[in-house]
Image: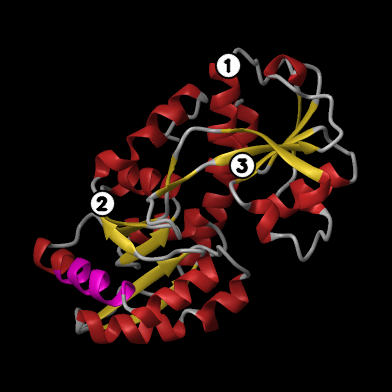
Amino acid sequence: MKKKFVGIAIVILTILATLTGCGQKKENDTLVMGFVPLIDGDKLVDSVKPLSKILTEAIGKEVEVFTATNYVGVVEAMGSSKVDFGIIPPFAYVLANKESGAQVILKALNKHGESFYRSEFVVKKNSNINSLDDIKGKRVAFVDPSSSSGYLYPGAYLKKNGIDIEKDIQVVYSGGHDKSIQLLLNNDVDLIAVFEGARSKYKKEFKNVLEDTKVFAYSEKIPYISVTVRGDMDEKTKEQIKDGLLKGLNSKEAKEITARLFSIHGFEEATDSDFDSIRTTAKLMNINLEK
């Protein structure tokens, strides 16, 4: 398991080097909002500019955008006070909290008004996989060892149900949810673990994906995307940001932007304990958050 995370350490070192050129934190009347590339990084910069204008007005301070090539980049930037707050995945929040005391203030909502999502296990329609016992010996595609919906939660689901990931299945890492779907459609794997609704999201790229595949099982609930502030922020500024974000991000215009870009349909207040399942799942999957 240790070998799978060596790459993450390399990424951290690379991003730390990159961040040295980002400059020091802006003056107090300017806030820096961090994003991970939940969509193509180049498109994201332009796409979130209208959002930064909305938040500038709602918070009362100018909001600038910082995008990283990887979620670790935002984690490290908050730790060094180069980013004031970030819209980041749940695992990234847990890492930021552990590393620099970053605090979650909001959590995202899906189109049903829920602050969670799930992983889904997908097989071909004609698959002979009908129970968990049928998975043994099969080729299973995960997305990436650091992906909550593409590895951590589906992996934990298998372990809780008696499947030894190291011995009972043949693991493949695809590098993307869409790439996992491609592997399944090409019969390169027997089973994939992707975020709930991935088949619908990529149905334009894969015309017959809904007809040719089916959902086999679901993972436990996964906390949704967080809004997290840096750990050394004073309480007055944190409350100012939280109040402004609740107003700005829940406006009709902002919801249209976040729904289109990230499938986020609003935000509500959050506490650290909302993300405890990330910690217990990481422990079950033998992930050392200290590293």
Image location of residue 104, percent across then percent down = 28, 53
Cβ atoms under marks 2 and 3 closer than 8 Å: no
Image location of residue 268, percent across then percent down = 27, 59
Of marks 3 and 1, which one's residue comes earlier in the chain?
3
Cβ atoms under marks 3 and 1 closer than 8 Å: no
Quarter of the figure that contains the N terminus: top right
Q: Amino acid at mark 1?
A: Asn
- At x 50%, y 62%, the residue is 36
Mark 3 Cα shell of 10 Å, populated few (<14), some (14-19), many (≥20): many
Mark 2 Cα shell of 10 Å, populated few (<14), some (14-19), many (≥20): some
Under tag 1, what secondary structure?
loop
Under tag 3, what secondary structure?
helix
Of marks 2 and 3, which one's residue comes earlier in the chain?
3
Picture layout, residue 50 above or below residue 203:
below
Q: Which residue is mark 1?
A: 161
Q: Which residues are magenta?
A: 240-250
Picture layout, residue 169 above or below residue 63:
above
Q: Is residue 10 left or right of residue 134?
A: left
Determine if residue 198 is in view: yes
Q: Which residue is mark 3?
A: 150
Identify the main secondary structure in magenta.
helix
Residue 270, disc: 2
